[in-house]
Image (cartoon, rainbow, N blue to C red):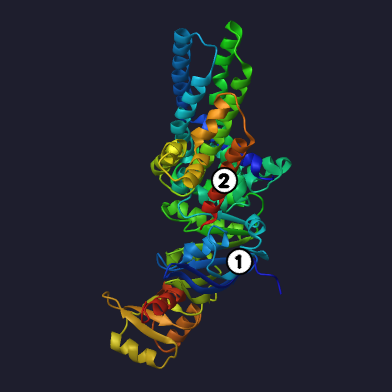
Amino acid sequence: MKGFAPLLGKEIRALFYAPVAYALIAVFLLLMGYSFTLTLFLNKYATLIHIFFQSAGLLLLIVPIITMRLFAEERKGGTLELLLTAPVRESHVVLAKYVASMAVVLSMIGLTGCYALVLGLFGSPEWGPIYSGYLGLALLSSTLVSIGLAVSALTANQVVAAIVTIGISFTLWMIDSLAGMMPDALERVLISFSLLARFTPFATGAMYTSDFGFFLTSTLLALFLAMRALARR
Amino acid sequence: MTQPVVSAQNLVKSYGPRLAVDGVSFDVQPNEVMGLLGPNGSGKSTILRILTGYLKPTSGTASVAGFDVVDNGLEARGQLGYVPEDVPLYTHMRVIEFLEFMGRVRGVSESGLARSVDRAIERLALGKVRELLIAKLSRGYRQRVAIAQALLGEPKLLILDEPTNGLDPRQIIEVRELIRALSRDLSVLVTSHILAEIERVAHRVAILLDGKLLTVHTLGSQAGGRMKVRVPAGTADEVRRNLASLTGVRIAEVLPVPGLYVLEHDGTAAATIAALVGAGLAVEEATPAGSGLEALFLRLTEGPGA
């Protein structure tokens, strides 16, 4: 993995030095905090299920904003040429951007852990669904980040990258609602691609190997597409 | 015979039906400054991008220090430093931070990094700006930072794409002197669409037009060229009659100032002047007026289809 560490360092610095990451984290925590407090006081349930679903919904919007600049900015500024003509592997360039983006998203999700802490201090929540919910959010983020990365690798325009990523992410999120109108065979296929259908078991405390497999496979496939997009020169 | 640092054989790059590079072959020898000269769109940058691994050739092969740029791309890229045309840099980084990053990316070991970066900073006179953000640097300093990063890791080949674009006259002279100095340690492949720039730094020049390599011209022999001479005595016809007895010298232009002519000569400047005097022409002044390269370039690019 020679050459990977400096690339990762550069990506992490670029993401965390920019105000965008902090603005997104702040807005995310503000909205989640509002939702958590309101639901807790109204329902008096020691659960985070609604937080997981709302987080997932917000991630569909926030992740594309984080990933849109990753390759598009480098392509537009010409630094991609500088990077890809250095003795580094394209896979390392893609992986460094993926890991750095995941670091931002996981920090964001990790900070909502204080809600779980509050529930633990003042109530007696079921910890199983909380653990699985966070795992589900991490896996969902991984797929969304990879999709954003692949789209960003295809264009020099950040806005286009963000819009296309949001489009793909939302389509995959709610594709199961279209499934009901389809013949049986197609219905099963569409549901199997639905991010919502794959995420729901995690948020409600159930974990299936097939859902793990889906998130991991979709991540690897999108990362592979990002590498192919870079190699297409 | 020493192995060439760059060897390109029948390089072709097509974008759909358009051929950006059309069967180009050339080599660059150790410690040689090779110029790629041609008008905008002649395929110079595409050739550089193929050599640096940024673009893949449609057909043909190229190697850098013996490593094929496609099959052994990583190793080939490790042997070269590259400064793209628009000098792309990470402007949010400080100069020292950027150079350290590029050093690591270029495979310089942690133990040798500080020494390597300091050497590059010293060579490019970047000491004054080492702690500044790249975004705050002038075009000239950015160019120097870009060249500095290309020198990290002791490459065998430095590739510069239009290195004097956007620089003021003083900075152009600095870049020219830098290329000459660097060629003592490595080979340099430099492109330009400005003929005068290339001929001042290059040992050999490959002339390109519409993706085709027209010729590779060796500079420095001083044979052939144009010179402006002052011959106050006699009319233009008399001068022309005197020149008729000489071979390899002809009047290219009669200037509006009486007694001033531009001559084209095939031999060296000294031999031509001696021949002129020997033929009875009282030459009071002789200055170079463009080189053999200029005449060659014009001749090659004036042909049918050019």
Q: In which chain is the residue bearing label 1? A: B
The amino acid marked with disc number 1 is Glu
User: Residue under circle 2?
Assistant: A223
Which residue is at the front of the view, A75 or A214? Answer: A214
Q: Which label sits on residue B72?
A: none
Crowding at label 1, few (<14), some or many (≥20) Cα neighbours within 10 Å? Answer: many
Q: In which chain is the residue bearing label 2? A: A
Q: Residue at x 62, y 39 (%)?
A: A213
Quarter of the image where one finds residue A27: top left
The amino acid marked with disc number 2 is Leu
Which residue is at the front of the view, B156 or A47? Answer: A47
Q: Secondary structure at mark 2?
A: helix
Vertical side of A52 occupied by B54: above or below: below
In the orientation shown, which residue stands out farthest toward the left? B256
Q: Residue at x 56, y 69 (%)?
A: B203
Residue A176 seen anywhere in this rendered image of the structure = yes
Q: Residue at x 41, y 51 (%)?
A: B168
Q: Which label sits on residue B32?
A: 1
Where residue A197 sits: x, y (%)? Answer: 51, 34
In the orientation shown, which residue stands out farthest toward the bottom? B245
Task: Please count the marks in the image.
Answer: 2
Tell if the residue under mark 1 belongs to the same chain as the one under mark 2.
Answer: no
In the picture provided, is B156 more to the left or to the right than B277?
Answer: right
Residue B141 seen anywhere in this rendered image of the structure = no
Quarter of the image with the C terminus of chain B in it: bottom left
Where residue B260 sits: x, y (%)? Answer: 32, 77
Where residue A39 sits: x, y (%)? Answer: 46, 13
